Image (cartoon, rainbow, N blue to C red):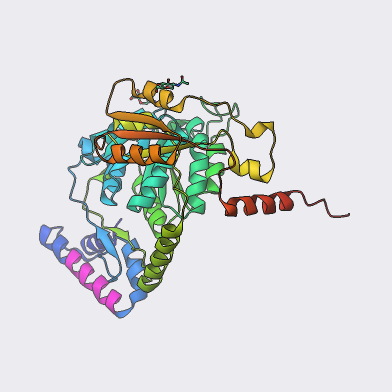
Amino acid sequence: MPVYDMMESFLVKKLNFKPTLRLRIATRTSYVALTMFLAMTFPFFGGLLSFFGGLPTNGAVSTVQNSAVPYNSVESTLGRHLARRLVQIGVTDVFSVPGDFNLTLLDHLIAEPGLNLVGCCNELNAGYAADGYARARGVGACVVTFTVGGLSVLNAIAGACSENLPVICIVGGPNSNDYGTNRILHHTIGLPDFTQELRCFQTVTCYQAVVNNLEDAHELIDTAISTALKESKPVYISVSCNLPAIPHPTFSREPVPFMLSPKVSNKMGLEAAVEAAAEFLNKAVKPVMVTAQDVSTMLRSGQKSIIFLINNGGYTIEVEIHDGPYNVIKNWNYTALVDAIHNGEGNCWTTKVRYEEELVEAIETATGDKKDCLCFIEVIVHKDDTSKELLEWGSRVSAANSRPPNPQ
Ligand SMILES: *[C@@H]1O[C@H](CO)[C@@H](O)[C@H](O)[C@H]1NC(C)=O
Ligand SMILES: CC(=O)N[C@H]1CO[C@H](CO)[C@@H](O)[C@@H]1O
């Protein structure tokens, strides 16, 4: 219960005030005045009070204010609350793979104006897409299903953790009634234990919210989202599959301000870093490499990117560390593969180049005539065409890997 409600009921019950609208306005106004006074006096209390639902009290804290949502409407459901929060923090695209534990949740995410669901080919791709989105937009989100989906997306979430990216990983979880029943559920590994997925996520996320009842869903979801933003790390939110469609007063009543502490970076430090990186990249003679994943999703969502596939016939980094037959991969006709995925739906242009002149021409076409297409340029290179740095690095890793065991 927010503090002002407690004050109000105290006045009504203990001091026999009449529960009128005027009393409500008076208690709330005094509460706001009090929190602002305290926050100005003791900046420390700013954060503490915000926790109780007070006003933004610290100059460095911004709030996202809900507009009141009618009670008992489809908008006051758990699913819509989660969707609204995503939109409020700037997530307009959520990367998802449907599964039987999350379909109703996806319905609610789709229903939110301003939120676009991007269906991906598999969970790992959804996770990496959310990773890229978080790099570009500050925060990203993906939605997958229980365990089978959660364990698939884990690698991308671990990557986001090491790269300090706030990725909100939402998992459709078991029916709330199944918790504590010792049942063996679909998608578990055959043990009556729902916590396997949670335990995996504990080591690669900074907060885990297991939402299996409506009473504390609001608090858990908001804490998860704000912790992700504050710590710039991924978080895990599991939502029981039978809850997203149910309205609850905590999702509808008085707007609860949502507190976010923006990350403040050192401006001079940032500028120096950008300058150094730009200088380094300008000097680089090797092109930036982009590998193709989820081309079909990019085509479906009308992306106009240029994808370069550097085809060197194998795993060059591994070749430089330690070569063997396992480093050679079967050569595919990659442009034909993209053509097959394209299948005449959407705008797509592919080409294969072998020489520098062909590459220059291909880039001109991709940025000219074909600028409205997803362009795929396969660049065939020699397997030893690599940088001096990679060669050096390879021999060092090789030396480090082959150190003999210490004498016991
Ligand atoms: C590879 O596919 C392209 C079509 O994308 C085709 O034009 C080309 O002939 C194929 N290459 C071979 C070696 O079959
Ligand atoms: C397991 C489970 O609860 N699945 C639900 C997923 O969503 C569909 C509706 O889209 C429900 O019918 C299922 O019960």
Q: Quadrant of ligand 1?
A: top left
* Residue located 28% across and 41% down the image: 367
* Residue located 45% across and 27% down the image: 334
Which stretch appears magenta? 27-40
Rendered image quadrant of residue 294 = top left
* Residue 84 visible to an observer of this rendering: yes
* Residue 173 visible to an observer of this rendering: no
Q: Name the quadrant of the C terminus.
A: bottom right
Picture layout, residue 273 above or below residue 130: below
| Position of residue 400 in the picture relative to residue 103 (left or right) | right
| Position of residue 99 in the picture relative to residue 63 (left or right) | right
- Magenta span: helix, strand or loop, mainly? helix
Q: Name the quadrant of the N terminus.
A: bottom left
Instruction: Please tell me which residue lies in front, 380 or 25.
Output: 380
Residue 212 spot, x, y in % from top left: 42, 39
Residue 14 painted magenta: no
Instruction: Please tell me which residue lies in front, 129 or 201.
Output: 129
Residue 122 spot, x, y in % from top left: 44, 30
Residue ranking furthest to the bottom: 41
Instruction: Please tell me which residue lies in front, 204 or 21.
Output: 204
Residue 35 painted magenta: yes
* Residue located 35% across and 51% down the image: 136
Give the total of numbered labels.
0
Picture layout, residue 242 above or below residue 356: above
